[in-house]
Image (spheres, grey):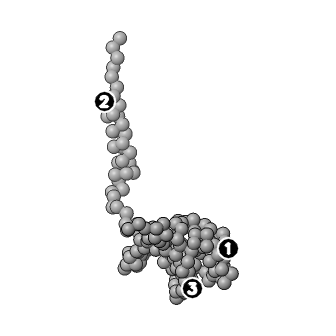
Amino acid sequence: MNKQLQQYLAENEAIHEFCVKFAVEPTDKQLDAMELHLRKYDGFDVSTPKKTIMQRNPRDFRSIKAAEVYMIDFKTRQPVSPLQLLAELTQKMGIHERFIIVRNKMEPLHIEDEAQETPETKYKPKLTDEKYSDAAKVKASDYYGDKHTASFIKDLKKGRKEHTTKVKI
């Protein structure tokens, strides 16, 4: 039952899976630079880019109006964080980080309920609401005017009487 070192290493080998998404079409030169850089992390099983349909607001690229998203899956034997890969790939490929997303396949997906994103009722901006329909209804005379000023002064006089004491000498 003696296992050799090669068997232990083979059994304990960890594989890390990633997905890179581009909001711009990567060129062949950029893809070659990416594959060359992934050798640093013992990268393998790099897939060919898969293209999605044109989307008005791509899921991972909310700041971009309309784009086709290109996805590439790959695996590494060396551990690396998605943020580290993002920083290195933007530098090596010459693509701005706004157009690249690196996701670890094991991290939970950002599940967004699209029903919550787009409300069923028509949204009306509050700045253009002339009648202030969302504002609480208050009685104006409680906050300004002659009655309010008179009651305020009366309360001030009452407060002064309570706090002043006569000093006997």
In this view, the mark in front (2 or 3): 3
Q: Secondary structure at mark 2?
A: helix
| N-term-proximal mark, 1 vs 2 | 1
Residues marked 2 and 3 touching at CB (< 8 Å): no
Q: Earlier in the sequence, mark 2 or mark 3?
A: 3
Q: What residue is shown with label 2? A: 162
Badge 1: residue crowd in 10 Å (few <14, some 14–19, many ≥20): few
Q: Pinpoint residue 43: horizontal percent, then vertical percent.
A: 57, 74
Closer to the camera: disc 1 or disc 3?
3
Residue at point 35%, 48% (across, down): 147
Give the number of the mark in front: 1 or 2: 1
Label drawn at residue 2: none
In the rendered image, residue 88, in percent from the top left (x then y), is placed at 62, 68
> Could you classify mark 3 by the number of other residues whose Cα lies within 10 Å: few (under 14), some (14-19), or many (20 or more)?
few
- Residue projecting furthest to the bottom: 53
Quick check: marks 1 and 3 in contact, CB under 8 Å?
no
Q: Position of residue 109 (x, y in %)?
A: 43, 73
State yes or no: discs 1 and 2 in contact (Cβ < 8 Å). no
Looking at this view, is 43 or 152 the one in front? Answer: 43
Tell me, for residue 48, which label it has, or none. Answer: 3
Specify the amino acid type for callout 3: Thr
At x 52%, y 75%, the residue is: 75
Q: Nearer the viewer, residue 2 or 164?
A: 2
User: What type is the residue that disc 1 sits on?
Assistant: Gly
What residue type is disc 2 on?
Answer: Glu
Find the distance from the CA under tag 1 to the CA under tag 2. Answer: 75 Å
Pointer 1: what residue?
Answer: 94
For the C terminus, the image quarter is: top left
- 166 to 99, vertically: above or below: above
Q: Secondary structure at mark 1?
A: loop
First in sequence: mark 1 vs mark 3 = 3
